[in-house]
Image (spheres, rainbow, N blue to C red):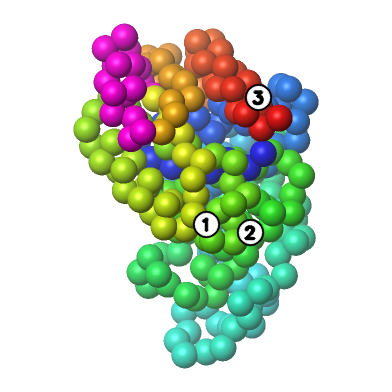
Amino acid sequence: MKLAIGGKGGVGKTTLVALLSKAFRERGMDVIIVDADPDPNLAGALGFPDADKIIPVAQMKELIEERTGAKVGAFGSFFKMNPKVEDLPDELSVEKNGIRLLVMGTVKGGGSGCVCPESVLLKNLITHLVLSRDEVVLMDMEAGVEHLGRGTSGAVNRLIIVVEPGRRSFETAERIKTLAADIGITGIAIVGNKVRNDSDREFIEKNALDVPVLGFLPYSAKAIEADMKSIPAAEADESLRLAASEIADKLLAENK
């Protein structure tokens, strides 16, 4: 199963990825999670030690130059468009409790359409993860689909857009849906987060952009407190763990 998780900053993408990774692992599945957000914090959300010392792949200049044959930051140079990446998930990921984490980072500068050695390596790495790996792959994306492409769109089982009760998160969700359609991703669904009551659920269902709603994560003061103490949310609030388990079961049922 290959899942991309997107949404407006602060809606809880990282929380959902962390919760789902634990849910799938509890069901005996091998899991690799990819942090492709500009502000990577999945390692902290899952309690990985020395999270602040993990270097994103996008910042590994020597590796990028070795694999692509071009100097990072140079203009007008030739470089490989299909660099070798098959060994990188195992070599560069870190592991805790059976969950592997690969921190990708993102290309800074150059525009969203940047064709540069960094972006080529990242996209090839994502393509390999989606098309060639046997694990459950969960990708914590930035508020777009920049790391995905037409070559991987058909293999992504779901693009899950996380929203919260509020207009701005749905404005971002609509943009993500449009970008996804441009590259052929059709398996789009929504997960509502920070849901306090039936009114919040109804708001999300009413504004769901004509795509399925997979489930809801409750608003959790315990999760906020846990984040302040660098404790994984799934360990702080049983209601979050149960809600994520229901979403995981629904995704598994879809994938049979």
Mark closer to the chain start, 1 or 2 = 2
Mark closer to the chain start, 2 or 3 = 2
| Residue that mark 2 sits on | 127
Between residue 64 and residue 189, name the one nearer to us. Answer: 189
**Crowd tier of the residue under label 2, counting other residues whose Cα lies within 10 Å: few below 14, some 14–19, many 20 or above:** many
Between residue 204 and residue 9, name the one nearer to us. Answer: 204
Q: Are marks 1 and 2 in contact (CB under 8 Å)?
A: no
Which amino acid, by three-letter code, is at mark 3?
Ala
Magenta segment:
193-210
Tag shown at residue 84: none
In which quadrant of the rendered view does residue 64 lie? bottom right
Residue 86 location, x and y as percent?
75, 61
**Crowd tier of the residue under label 1, counting other residues whose Cα lies within 10 Å: few below 14, some 14–19, many 20 or above:** many
At 23% from the left and 37% from the top, the residue drawn is 168
Tag shown at residue 253: 3
Q: Is residue 242 above or below residue 230?
A: above
- Verify whether residue 208 appears in magenta: yes
Q: Quadrant of the C terminus?
A: top right
Q: Is residue 148 above or below residue 162?
A: below
